[in-house]
Image (cartoon, coloured by chain):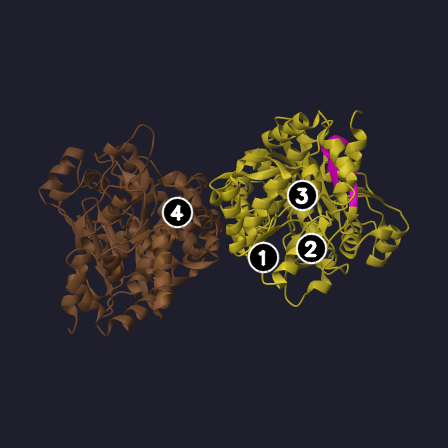
Chain colours: A yellow, B brown
Amino acid sequence: MSADRQSANLRGLLGAEPVVATAGVGLFADALRDQALTVIEAEWQPPMEGTEGDLARVLADPRRAQANALAAQRMTASTATLVDVVQAKDAVGLERGTFLHAGPPLEWERASGPMRGALIGAVLFEGLAETAEDAEEQLAAGVFELEPCHHRDAVGPMAGVISPSMWLYELRDEVHDNMSWCSLNEGLGKVLRYGAYNDEVITRLHWMTDVLGPLLQQSVRSTGPFDITGILAQMLQMGDEGHNRNRAGSLMLLREMLPGLITAEGSSTDIAEAVRFSGANEHFFLNLGMPACKLATMAAHGIPGSTIVTTMARNGTDFGIRVSGTGEQWFTGPANTPEGLFLGDYGPKDANPDIGDSAITETGGIGGFAMAAAPAIVKFVGGDVPFALQATQRMYEITETEHPMFQVPILEFRGTPTGIDVTKVVRTGILPQINTGMAGAVAGTGQVGAGLVTPPEACFPAALAALAAAVDD
Amino acid sequence: MSADRQSANLRGLLGAEPVVATAGVGLFADALRDQALTVIEAEWQPPMEGTEGDLARVLADPRRAQANALAAQRMTASTATLVDVVQAKDAVGLERGTFLHAGPPLEWERASGPMRGALIGAVLFEGLAETAEDAEEQLAAGVFELEPCHHRDAVGPMAGVISPSMWLYELRDEVHDNMSWCSLNEGLGKVLRYGAYNDEVITRLHWMTDVLGPLLQQSVRSTGPFDITGILAQMLQMGDEGHNRNRAGSLMLLREMLPGLITAEGSSTDIAEAVRFSGANEHFFLNLGMPACKLATMAAHGIPGSTIVTTMARNGTDFGIRVSGTGEQWFTGPANTPEGLFLGDYGPKDANPDIGDSAITETGGIGGFAMAAAPAIVKFVGGDVPFALQATQRMYEITETEHPMFQVPILEFRGTPTGIDVTKVVRTGILPQINTGMAGAVAGTGQVGAGLVTPPEACFPAALAALAAAVDD
């Protein structure tokens, strides 16, 4: 460049209003804005603190690219069909006195209100105690076994408590020959999964066990299996995101199940009540979408070198993740409390920290990751429509692939962001976006609202450290 | 402004790259672009040719603003509940030998292929002819009466042929004490409304008359009335636009009707077949959404001075509109042929010009006007997602109001553009956007595709002239 030209450029630069581009901490940008300067903030952030060494080691792992591609391929190629409805004692061999729960492993002492409430209710429901006090004493004394649903390839929304007499949906992935299970949805309000355990709750659980389960089993056995993946793909084109909005999915499931329900052997009163109960529940489908996502993530699990997250689950105290390349190890941190919209007079102080296995939907590429497909959900979980669009857009930054079947019409049919990569989360600091219901913090309360939440940051550097330790294994 | 300042501004103007803003015909902009100049085209267009005088007269009508506000208020305050299912002879007093059809008045000689096919089929179905040739001869000889559905407050999709034995949905607007009717949906493919009339079509019509109609009547009478406006509002939040996409609406309607269907008196085979037939039809709801929109537009009709369109309907030859302030007069022009996507081997040369009363959905603020709520529809009617968003945005330019109940989540819950104003259409040249099915041009063919279409421009200056003539009436 000639000296003249250089000098002219410099004059141009000095003559124009200065514009400063900043990156990283907002302090610099704020200071400049206070001086009335124009600032362009780049979205870059440094990696999570202290992760540089592990990040370098894991990113240099020669297995990683292929392992993650394989994990993504398996996750998106999995299928889910509803093949049966079976009691937990038969489905997952659940022993009397053992209770499954949502999230990573947990002891009674550390359990939150809604988890305690759900366990008390399940003990009462199984007839292992006469009163709530009796149930609580036995639980505190360690009389019963507690075990994560995930350890039996099952998932449960909110408290996710499963006891041997409960009926479970049984789903099969024919491509990878896996099975997964989930409880039946109880509806909204005062329900066990939100920690309520009064007579109404226990009576409904008995009706579900004695009447609903057997009828659903007849329906599936006579007219199934039902293609759950197909419903998931369709519902994303009908304003659902599959976690907190399941309206279209529930209607499609109902259409599949009804003919078999109507013709089932049973009293016409029981059948009419089963149809009414199922039709009135806008979250009927959630308990099918969750095990479908569980099957997808199971298919991607256990690939050496893969940094793809295959479980995100919360027990109301801890948030835990598991990663494809690190086997059965949980990486946990304290669960955040969701922010969102509250029912009735409830407010933020009533909400329990994040709880439930339902974050398996986000792990599988739907739920919060598909919010752009479900803008109407902001009336239920909070936020606004631009936020819903941005949430999905932002998740592309931390995922391995785009789901070929789960398409978002408004993003011109782009596939949902699928397969959370631990290295991308640590490097960008962008945390997975989760939509969730909110349970009351006090045992027995039930649902208090719905909202938005992220995992605690701590899970990801911990998982990265384990991945780093496993390099060259 | 000082002379110095003026001179400095002028130098700035001359020193900078010139940018030209153009409006109206694109010729100027194109010529400038050919000379590598930057052009900003304003979307302004001159009013439709020769309308200046009428436009000035109508816009100056002191009744207009209030009349249109009242029309919009009535259109959006109307309700629609499904109160009964009744045969046409009883519902609208249809006499044997009289046939209702879609669109403005029409004689056999000017009828298109699908309209002729549907009329032939209806004559056969009513047992008024033994063969298609016989039916055609009688129709050509003027043996039967033909009358628009709209003249009996009814609507029919595509050919819209209604004969006395057919069952109709009966809807009521409680706010304005109006009633409207629509035929039952036959499903897709070879069906009467698309001009097919082979044995399969006639057999299905007999089954609908003997079995389906009476069962639906029992369902509505035992468990109705059903809130159709509520379903319309919900389906727009579930990816439907209510004209060519009715998936969520059909599922919600099914959920309402099923309990009454299941418990209806009748053979279990008949009931199972009625449930299967209804559940398999993704356009089941269209025949409820149409009369709901008819009720909305009826409420807005007949207000002196109002320039709001209260009917848009096509008979396969002519496109006709009626306007609130000009009573029962039709303003017609030759129907355009839709452009879109074709089934199987069909192509543009197979398509009949625009046909059907279903443009009542656009007249009532949904269908093409609500495409932004249903981006997935572009896979069915053509166009792309940005087009779907723009279609709705553009319709705000020619409408009086935003529907308070019909909200589009992706537009941050903005109400759909509702109440087409003739003066706005004439002044802007923007024509209403209609989504539609495409019938084969040859009688007997059936559906060949689905696409996008607009009314012929001619309807609107003609309506404006009548409005101008009615000023100071």
Disc with the residue nearer the chain's start (2 vs 1): 2
Secondary element type, mark 2: loop
Badge 2: chain ID: A
**Circle 2 residue:** A191
Q: Is residue A328 visible?
A: no
What amino acid type is highlighted by mark number 2?
Val
Q: CA distance from mark 2 to mark 1?
A: 26 Å
**Circle 3 residue:** A428
What amino acid type is highlighted by mark number 4?
Ala
Q: Is residue A330 magenta?
A: yes
Secondary element type, mark 3: helix
Q: Name the residue at the left extreme.
A: B141
State which quadrant residue B399 falls in.
bottom left
Residue located 56% across and 45% down the image: A393
Across and down, in percent, residue B297 comes to 30, 61
**Circle 4 residue:** B388
Badge 1: chain ID: A
Q: CA distance from mark 4 to mark 1?
A: 24 Å
